[in-house]
Image: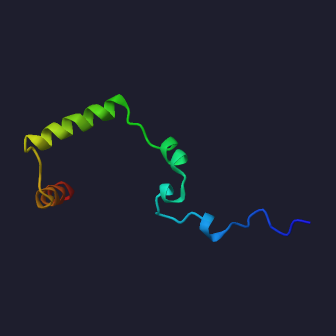
Amino acid sequence: MNTHKPFDIEPSEMLKAAEPMAAYGHTTTTEECLYRPTPYEMEVIRKSEEDIKAGRVYTQEEVDKMVEEWLS
């Protein structure tokens, strides 16, 4: 007679929230769940990287000021 319930899991086998699955040996599942950007998203990322390299960026203070103006 089996005394284990189907939901009994050893503490070492339990996954914890916000911890990488790789730490528990589940790298295959982790790799399969990776998001793959669309070609459009990759183009946006590439253009953003060019903007950063060219210095076309805003500070957080500048962004906060623009948002405040837009909302008023």
- Return the residue nearer the eye: 27 or 63: 27
Q: Is residue 41 above or below residue 30?
A: above
Measured as percent of width and height from the top left, residue 62 is found at 11, 57
Q: Is residue 45 above or below residue 26?
A: above
Q: Residue furthest top?
A: 39
Tell me the quadrant of the picture where the C terminus can be found: bottom left
- Return the residue nearer the eye: 61 or 10: 10
Residue 6: quadrant of the picture: bottom right
Q: Is residue 50 above or below residue 24?
A: above
- The way the protein has been coloured in the rendering is rainbow
Q: Is residue 42 above or below residue 52?
A: above
- Return the residue nearer the eye: 52 or 25: 25
Q: Is residue 42 left or right of residue 68?
A: right
Measured as percent of width and height from the top left, residue 5 is found at 80, 66
Tell me the quadrant of the picture where the N terminus can be found: bottom right
Q: Residue at x 15, y 56 (%)?
A: 63
Q: How many marks?
A: 0
Q: Residue at x 38, y 32 (%)?
A: 38
Q: Residue at x 18, y 40 (%)?
A: 49
Q: Residue furthest right?
A: 1
Q: Is residue 61 left or right of residue 38?
A: left
